[in-house]
Amino acid sequence: QFIRETNMSHRKFSAPRHGSLGFLPRKRTKKHRGKVKSFPKDDPSKPCHLTAFMAYKAGMTHILREPDRPGSKTNKKEVVEAVTILETPPMVAVGIVGYIETPRGLRSYKTVWAEHLSEECKRRFYKNWYRSKKKAFTKSCKRYGDASGLETIERDIEKMKKYCKVIRIIAHTQIRLTALKQKKSHIMEIQVNGGSIIEKVDFARSLLEKEVSANTVFSQDEMIDIIGATKGKGFRGVTFRWGTKKLPRKTHKGLRKVACIGSWHPSRVGFSVARAGQTGYHHRTEVNKKIYRIGLGEDASNASTKYDTTEKKITPMGGFPHYGIVKQDYIMLKGCVMGPKKRVITLRKSRRIHTSRVALEKINLKFVDTTSKFGHGRFQTLEEKKAFMGTLKKDIATSA
């Protein structure tokens, strides 16, 4: 009788390769802004809505909450979790693009621009703004001034309604509202999902030259995807880049190397062999990031909770290191986000239908930490620090 062995193995199980080949080539991305390579599937039965947004990474903090997971060891117990704060100033819609389906995929058919474009938007179309003649969109905006121009716009809109299958708006960030020094805004196409094509075009047209807030695109407790460029590390060795084993201590000419980079024949180095090279600043998409809170910029207590009623804003004491003060709306995501501070991050609605208990869980925050992130944070607010420290010598000097 044949008895099958249960402990059969193979070298690929006992000593699997180091690093994934799914992310080749590991080189610097051409896209500083995260590119949405596929939008969520359209459902005409739902009302018209936008499917993406852009934000700026401010920094991280931690929160305290009680998970609602019956059967889990952490159920109804306080847990501390790391969260990332993304500043989301309202975006402005400045154009509509219609796509038609061809045998080779989608092709842009008609584009209609708004009458007025802000300077921060126009800067994106120039390499050197102050040396340029600043002529961008001076002719297209004149269309709105005469009858023939308006007729052309209406004709393009009607053609979109008749022939197009996908409608997207062109929107830009308002970077001047953030703490960043950059004056050039980021522009992206955001797909409109839901409703018929006629409803999509009318919805997109109603948004032209208007501000779109993050809370109109996303909602509390929603699972979203984030897209962006990772933090650049420069040229790094094979041990850091691929996580390969270090050679024995007495190895000649260094030990942070790969000992054998291939056989004699074929007489070339294979693509799958780990080598030194560029690490970081790669374009990445991370799925299933849960929104813990969407805070409003004008709310003076946008970091307060039902349990911690202290009036405080999300910016920690002394500001977010290497970023500054968050004055606009913000989104709080569970866990980390790719890239350094100030990096522009593209947020996209999830492409999958979520049914897991973790994805559907309602988040109830008990406490949001706002202590200084520059050293050992002790006080949550400036008022708390003054109450504890009392009158200081520098206070007397300023009052005198």
Image (cartoon, rainbow, N blue to C red):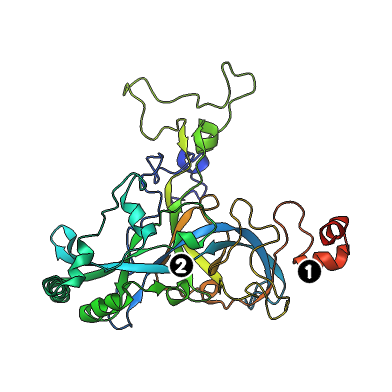
**In the image, residue 103 above or below residue 65:** above
Query: Considering the numbered disc 2 on the image, is that residue within a helix, a strand or a loop?
Result: strand
**Res 143 visible:** yes
Q: Position of residue 353 (x, y in %)?
A: 41, 73
Secondary structure beneath dot 1 equals: helix
Within 10 Å of the Cα at label 1, are there few (<14), some (14-19), or many (20+) other Cα atoms? few
The type of residue carrying mark 2 is: Ile
Q: Nearer the viewer, mark 1 or mark 2?
A: 1
Q: What residue is at 18 percent from the left and 60 percent from the top?
A: 105
- The mark found on residue 224 in the picture is 2
Task: Tell me, yes or no, if residue 10 can be seen here.
Answer: no
Which comes sooner in the sequence, label 1 or label 2?
2
**Residue 134: horizontal and vertical position, in percent?**
30, 52
The residue closer to the viewer here, 279 or 213, is 213
Label at residue 383 = 1
Q: CA distance from mark 1 to mark 2?
A: 36 Å
